Structures are given as C-alpha cells and as structure tokens.
C-alpha cells in the first residue's frame, strides 16, 4: 500500500528505508512486517512501531468516578488493566488515565465524544504519543543499557514513568504469546531519537526492527 496516509508515524522514514510492508491502521501507515527474519529478531530483541494505535486520556479529581460510570476497568494507582475489549487502560497516579485501543477495539472512540460533555472535575487530555514495543528474550539487556530503572523487578500490572536514553517514557510490561514484551510511549518529537538509540542496541544484541504483526497479531494476555 501507499505510505501517504493522513497521519504519519514519527519513524515512518526509518521503516520505509528498510523496505517494510505497510498497512493502514487508523489513517496511519504502519510497518506490519519488515522481512522474513522478523520472528527470529523478535526472539532476541525486536523493536516495533505501534504509534498507529488510537489514544486518549483524561484527568481530574472526579476522573475515577467518571471512568466507573463509563464502564471502564479501573487499574490500581500506577498500574494498568486490560479492558474487556482488549483496550489498555493505564492509571497515572490517582487521578489521570491513559487509554489505548487495539486495532480492533473502539474504547477511545466511545470515550472521546463523552469527554466533551463530562462533569466538572474531569478534563480531557490529548494524547498523540509515539508508541513502541520491545519484545524478546534479551529485552532486559537492552533496558539495562538505556535506563537506570530495574525493570526485571517490575510486575505485569505496573506502569512506570521513567527516562530511557534521556527521554521521558511511560512503560508497562505486556507479554505477547508468553514472550517478554514492554510497551513504551514517548513524546513524538523525541520518538526518532529514541527509536534510533533502541534500534542500535537491539542490532548489537542480535535483534532489530520487526513489524507490528509480531505484537498486534499475537494472542492477547489473559
């Protein structure tokens, strides 16, 4: 397909240079696969661009009550939960929430219009984060080289705000098909730099870029 979609990933040029196979998700061209070695790289440490996934957020003193009224699963403070439709709900502190849909879900599409009419104490937060996934047996080796936070001690339900290679990031662990996987979000203006840094280390470890299908087509965690 053409990569001239309405929205562009901040690392589109990097993936075009690799000759990736693109599909369109949410009006953004996403590299579904790089080449036939995707699975091998993902077994070591693969980096995938998931910036195409729809996102939104809200915060405020009454945000938790409002989320309950909308039927949204409430994670613990600084934690995340999987909604019934496979969307992600991340809780940042006590009163801020970040939601990301999968390609097949539409929680954001329901929440965004509702936020226009919400009560006082609930405020929309525009989210256009770049999103990456790091997957594979040697992911923690990469994390050690880029971040002082000890991710080996992070449980599956935690959400961590930290820095990687000097870039502020939100990180959760969400394994795919029993394979270690971290989901990472950052400001899109820093995305190309962070991608280049993570990719360089992944290549040194024997991995590298992989298509989004490695993560998005995998079986979701229970």
Image: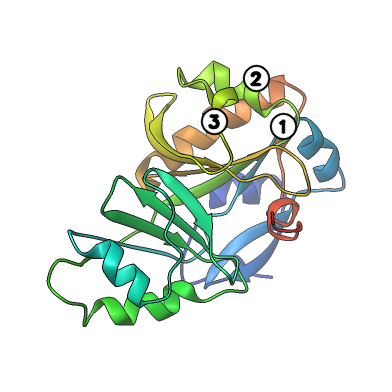
Residue that protrudes farthest toward the left in the picture: 120
For the residues bearing labels 3 and 2, Cβ distance under 8 angstroms: no
Considering only order in the chain, which callout, 1 or 3, is on the residue closer to the N terminus?
1
Query: Can you identify the residue that label 3 sits on?
Result: 154
Considering only order in the chain, which callout, 2 or 3, is on the residue closer to the N terminus?
2
Q: Tell whether 57 sits left or right of 87.
A: left
Query: Can you identify the residue that label 1 sits on?
Result: 45
- Above/below status of 41 relative to 93: above
Residue at the (30%, 45%) spot, across then down: 93
Q: Is residue 10 visible?
A: no
Q: Tell whether 96 sits left or right of 177.
A: left
Coloring scheme of the render? rainbow
Query: Can you identify the residue that label 2 sits on?
Result: 141
Classify 10 Å Cα crowding around label 3: few (below 14), some (14-19), many (20 and above): few
- Badge 2 element: helix
In percent of width and height, residue 56 lies at 37, 64
Considering only order in the chain, which callout, 2 or 1, is on the residue closer to the N terminus?
1
Q: Look at the image and tell me in which quarter the N terminus lies.
A: bottom right
For the residues bearing labels 3 and 1, Cβ distance under 8 angstroms: no
Q: CA distance from mark 3 to mark 2?
A: 14 Å
Q: CA distance from mark 3 to mark 1?
A: 18 Å
Residue at the (41%, 80%) spot, across then down: 110
Q: Tell whether 18 sits left or right of 154.
A: right
């Amino acid at each position: 397909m053409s990569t001239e979609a309405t929205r562009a990933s901040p690392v589109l040029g990097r993936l075009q240079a690799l000759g990736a196979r693109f599909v369109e998700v949410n009006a953004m061209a996403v590299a579904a696969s790089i080449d036939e070695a995707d699975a091998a790289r993902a077994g070591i440490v693969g980096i995938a661009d998931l910036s195409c996934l729809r996102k939104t957020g809200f915060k405020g003193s009454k945000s938790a009550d409002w989320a309950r009224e909308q039927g949204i699963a409430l994670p613990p403070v600084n934690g995340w939960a999987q909604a019934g439709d496979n969307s992600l709900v991340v809780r940042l502190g006590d009163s801020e929430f970040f939601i990301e849909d999968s390609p097949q879900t539409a929680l954001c599409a329901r929440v965004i219009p509702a936020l226009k009419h919400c009560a006082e104490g609930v405020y929309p937060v525009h989210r256009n984060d770049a999103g990456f996934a790091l997957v594979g047996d040697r992911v923690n080796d990469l994390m050690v080289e880029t971040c002082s936070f000890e991710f080996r001690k992070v449980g599956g339900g935690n959400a961590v705000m930290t820095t990687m290679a000097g870039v502020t990031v939100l990180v959760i662990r969400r394994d795919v098909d029993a394979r270690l996987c971290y989901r990472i979000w950052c400001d899109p203006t820093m995305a190309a730099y962070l991608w280049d840094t993570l990719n360089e280390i992944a290549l040194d470890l024997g991995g590298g870029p992989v298509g989004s299908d490695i993560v998005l087509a995998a079986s979701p965690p229970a």
